[in-house]
Image: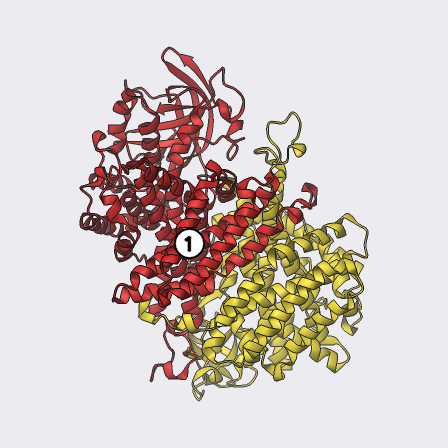
Chain colours: A red, B yellow
Amino acid sequence: MQIYTAPTEDFRFLLETLGYEKVHALAPYADYDLETVMSLLAAAGAFCRDVALPLNRKGDQVGLRFDPATGSVTLPEGFRSLYERYVEAGFASLGHDPAFGGGGAPHTVAVLVNEMVTATNKSFSMCPGLSQGLIEALSHHGTDDQRARYLPKLIAGEWTGTMCLTEPQCGTDLGLLTTRAVPDGDRYRLTGTKIWITFGEHDLADNIIHLVLARLPDAPAGIKGISVFAVPKVLPDGARNGISCSGLEHKMGIHASPTCVMTLEDAVGELIGEPHRGMRAMFTMMNVARLNVGLEGVALGDIAYQTAVAFARDRRQGRAPDPDKRERGAAADNILAHPDVRRMLLEIKSTHEAMRALAVWTSLQIDTALHHEDPAARQAAADMAALLTPVVKSYCTERGFLNVSTAMQVCGGSGFTVDWSIEQYLRDLRIAMIYEGTNHIQALDLVGRKLPADGGRGYRDWSARVRSFCEAQGGDAGMAELVGPLLDALATLDGLTTWLGGGTADGETVGAAASAYLNAFALTALAYMWGLQVAEARRRDTPFAAVKVKTARYFVRHVLPEVDALARVVREGKEHIMAVAPDEF
Amino acid sequence: MQIYTAPTEDFRFLLETLGYEKVHALAPYADYDLETVMSLLAAAGAFCRDVALPLNRKGDQVGLRFDPATGSVTLPEGFRSLYERYVEAGFASLGHDPAFGGGGAPHTVAVLVNEMVTATNKSFSMCPGLSQGLIEALSHHGTDDQRARYLPKLIAGEWTGTMCLTEPQCGTDLGLLTTRAVPDGDRYRLTGTKIWITFGEHDLADNIIHLVLARLPDAPAGIKGISVFAVPKVLPDGARNGISCSGLEHKMGIHASPTCVMTLEDAVGELIGEPHRGMRAMFTMMNVARLNVGLEGVALGDIAYQTAVAFARDRRQGRAPDPDKRERGAAADNILAHPDVRRMLLEIKSTHEAMRALAVWTSLQIDTALHHEDPAARQAAADMAALLTPVVKSYCTERGFLNVSTAMQVCGGSGFTVDWSIEQYLRDLRIAMIYEGTNHIQALDLVGRKLPADGGRGYRDWSARVRSFCEAQGGDAGMAELVGPLLDALATLDGLTTWLGGGTADGETVGAAASAYLNAFALTALAYMWGLQVAEARRRDTPFAAVKVKTARYFVRHVLPEVDALARVVREGKEHIMAVAPDEF
C-alpha cells in the first residue's frame, strides 16, 4: 500500500496565513499569484502521486547497478523516464532565474514542490535537489561567462550537479581536506578522493557538473585555504574528464540514490569565485539546501501519517473504552476509538503541520530577503532566515524521524513489513539527521554563530516578533489558551539565550547545551506557528479550520511542556558531560 | 565492523549489587554460585562474539529461502551449525527443570545469556526464545504425560516451539480469533490461519511444536472461549501434520527470523490445560517473554553503543572547544573532545545501564517468586515482577530504539552504511516496540490491570521500597544529589497514580494517559536503579565504580527531568485527545 494525497489544502491555508500575498507583491514574482501557485502545486501533487510514488518501492528494492570496469551507475528502470517527465513539467527549473530559462517562481513554491517529490520518492528527489544547490552557487559566485556556460543546461535539467565536499578524513571538519588543484593554463588540474557524493554518477542526464572543494598550491592551512572548482564529467570537447565513480556506499535507505566515492586524477576544473574563499560559495548553497533537508522530515512524516490514518480507518480491534461509543452489532470497534491511537496520530499531526508552517515561514523570509525593495526589510528577513534555517534542518528531521516511527507503531506488525512502505520511509529519512551538516552542527551554527551575529540582532528581532504577536492577541479571550503557554515558552527561551551569553559562553558549554537549546527554540517556534494558524483559523468557519484549532490545543498541552525539561538540561551546562573522560566510555 | 565485548563486568556488578546471593541461597539454585555464573556468562559471551556475531550480517543480507511447493523455509548457511553449537553448549536448556534435562539455572542467569545472544544475532535468538515460552506454558499447564512427552525434547533443543496467537483479523484483540478445534477421539482437529508466527517453519531442528490458540465448538464468544493446543509439525508416527507455512512476511529487519503465515487444515492437536481457559496459559508465557523482549532494547543498545565508542575513539574531526585540551601537533582532535559526542554517548550509557539493572532486578524477583521458602516473600516478589514487567518491555524497547539511533548519529554518515552494522541493529530492534503486546498494551496492562490489582498492593509496596531506600541513605551526604531527585520523581509518580485512581479512572482517561504514565514510572524506576548502583559503587574504590557514579549524575540531571513533562501530559488526561473526531485525522 502506497498512499499519498498532496496536502494542497494545508499549503493554501499556510500560504494565506503566513503572508504569501506580500511575497507575490515582490517585483519578480508577478506571475505567481496564489491561484496560479495552487494549480501548479495541484499539478505537481498529481505528478508525485502518479509518476514518482509508483517507482518509490522499486527504487528501494532494485537499487543501483555499479559497473567497476566503466564506473557507470545505472538507476532502476523507469527512473530516467521519471526524470525526463519531471524536467518536462518544469519542476527542475521552477525557482530559477528566467534569464537562464528558469521559471522564476518564489523559493517558497519550489520548496513546496520539493516536499511532495521527497514524500513520494526521496531517492529521486535528491538528484534535482543537488542541482539546485549547484545552481545557487554558480548564480552567486560564477562569472558572467561561467553562468552563461553552465546555468542554462543545469536549469533546463540537461545536466545535473553535485557538491563534492567530504573526504575520508574530513566531513564535519572541512579544514582537513587535501584534494589538490594545480594551475594548468587558465584551468586547474584536480587530484584527490571525495566520498558521500550524492548522484556523483548516474544515467539520468548527459553530463554532471561537480562542485569540488580543493586546495591551491599556495593555500593557507585549514578552512581558509579552500577554493571551489567546477569539474564537469564530460568536457566541452566531448572527452571524459578525469573524475569518475570508484564505488558506491551500501546504506540503510535511499537505495536508489547513488552515494559515490569519486576519484579525481588530473581532472580539469575551473575556479568559481576567488581563490581560498570557497567556503563562502558553500554557505550560499547551504541555506536553501538545509531548508530542503528539514522539509524531508515533514515530507516523509506526512506520507507516513497518511498511511497510518488509512490503516487505522480500516482496522478493527478491541472495544471502545467508553461503552456509549461502541458500534452495535460489531465484534470490535475501529482502532480510532482508542485514545492512544488518536494520541499517536495527534503527536505526528500537531508537530508536522507546525514544522511545515515553520519551513514555509522561513521560505517566505528567503524570498523577501532576495527581492524586497526596502533594504531594511531585506536585512530583517535575511536575519530571520539565517536564524531559523538550522532550527528547521535539525528539528524537522529529528522529530520527523520520530513521527515516522510513531506512524509505524499505529500500524502494529503491518507497519514493520514492506507492505505498507512506512519502513522504507523510516530508513530513507534517517540520513537527514546526518547529512548537510549533522543536527548538532546545526545547533552549533544556531548558538555559536547565529545568536551572537550582529550583536544578537536576529534573536532579539525574532523574540520581539513573537511577543508582539502575543500582545496583539491580548483582547481575544479565545486565544489565551495558546498565547499564555507561548509566552511562557518564549520567556524560558529568552532566559536560556541570556544564560548562554547570547552564544558567547565558553565553547564546551555551548557544545554541551546547543542541541537541547535548539530543540527548546524549535518547540517555541512551532508554538508560534500554531499561534499564527489559530489566529487565522478563528476567522474562518470551516471544518478544516476547526481541526487546526484542536490540533493546536493538543500541541500546546501535550508537546510544548517538553520545553521545560530541555531548559533544565541546557542550564546543567557541561559539568556532568565533561566529567566523563574519553577512556571512561 | 562488528564489534562486541560481553558486558560481564557490568553483569557481575549488577548481580552483586542487586542481591544475587539471596537468589543463589534458594533451594534449587545451589549449583549456581556467583563464580560459577560468571564463568558461564564469560563462556556464553565468547560464544556470542565468536559464533553468533559473525553470522549476524549474513543473516540480514542473505535472508530466508521459502519454497512454496513444499512450504519449507531454509535459513542462511551456518545457522544450523550455530543452533547445534548453541544447544551443545547447554544454552537452550539453561534455565529449565533438571527433571527434564534442564540446567536448573536461575532465570536471571538465562536472561543475561539471552541479552548477549540477542545483541550478537537477534534473528537467531528468537528461535530458542520462542521455545522457552512454550516450555514455560507446558511446564505449568501440561499434564504429567504431556510434560514427559514434550519437555525433554524441547529442553534438549531437539525440537523447537512457537506461539500461534495472531490471525489476520485479530492481534491485540484475541477475542476475535476464529481458528476452530473439533474433537476427534481423544485429540482435536484444528483449522484456521495464523500470522506473524516466528520460526513457524525452519530447518534448524527436526520438529516444531506449535502452541495454537483456537475455539472449541461449544466455546463462548470472546476471550473467554479460547483454548490452547499443542500441534506438532511432525506427528509421533513420523507423518506430517496438517499445519504448514504458506508464506513469509517481508520485513524491515530480523531478516533471518522467519515470520510465517501458518495454515492449519485438520491439524491434529492436543488440549493443554482446561477448555476455554487458554489465556491463562498464554499469560504464563508472557512475563518471561516480555522481560526478554525488553532486554532486546538493552542488548542492541549495548552493541550499538560499543560500536559508536569504537568509531569515536578512532575518528578525528575539528578541534576541542577548550584550547587547553587540543592535542599539540595534530590537525584535529579525537571527536570525544566534543561535548555533544560525550552527551550522546552518556544519553545511551546512562539509560541502558539502568535499564539492564531494572531487567536484572525484575528477573531476581521472578526467581524469588518461584522458589523462596516464605510464601509472603514469594508473593511480594511476584507483585514486583508483575508490576515491573510491562515497564521493562515497553520502556527498554522504546528507549533502546532511540539509543541505537543515537549511536548511529555518533558515527555520522558511516553509521548509515551497512559497514558499521548499526543500521541493522536499528532495523532489527524496531519490531520489539510492537510484538509481544505493543508498548501501549504494556501501558494498559500496567495502569489498568497491575495498578488496581489486589487493592493497589503492588504499587504501594514498590513505592514504599523506593522511599525506604532513600530514607536509609539519609545520613550519607554523598547520596543526596541522587536521593533528592529520586524522591521528587517518586512523589510525582505517587501523585499521578492517585490522579489515575490507582488505575480505576474511566477507560478513555486510562488509555489517554497510560503511555506517558508508564514512561514516568520507568524513569523513576531507572533512577532507583541508579540509587542502588551508586550506593554500592561508593563502597568500592575502582575505576568502574567511579564511572558508575558519574553516569548516574548525568542520568539524574539530564534525563530524569523528563518526568515532569510526562507528568503534565498525564494530567492533561483525555480532553484534547478525544476532542479530535475519527474523521478529522
Kindly identify the residue that appears in the image at 74 percent across and 64 percent down. Answer: B18
Can the viewer see residue A414 in this picture?
Answer: no
Tell me the SS state at disc 1: helix
Horizontal side, residue A290 vs residue B26: left or right: left
* Residue closer to the observer: B448 or A562: A562
Quarter-of-image position of residue A342: bottom left
How many numbered marks have been drawn onto this rendered protein structure? 1
Of A307 and A359, the residue lying toward us: A359
Identify which residue is drawn at 71% across, 72% down: B465
Q: Residue B38 at x, y = what percent?
A: 76, 57
How packed mark 1 is, by other alpha carbons closer than 10 Å (few <14, some 14-19, many 20 or more), is: some
Residue A443: give x, y in percent of width and height: 50, 44
Q: Is residue B500 above or below residue A585?
A: below
Disc 1 residue type? Arg
Residue A574 located left or right of residue B282: right
Q: Is residue B26 above or below residue A220?
A: below
Name above or below for residue A166 compared with residue A472. Answer: above
How far from the left and from the top, in percent, is residue A380? 37, 41
In x, y percent, where is residue A217? 49, 15
Q: Is residue A282 visible?
A: yes
Which residue is labeled 1 in the image?
A: A467
Please give left or right for residue B539 compared with residue A95 in the image: right
Determine the residue positioned at 40% across, 12% down: A184
Q: Chain of mark 1?
A: A
Q: Nearer the viewer, residue B244 or A534?
A: A534
Q: Is residue A461 left or right of residue B420?
A: left
Q: Image height check: is B25 above or below A277?
A: below
Image quarter where the N terminus of chain A lies is bottom left
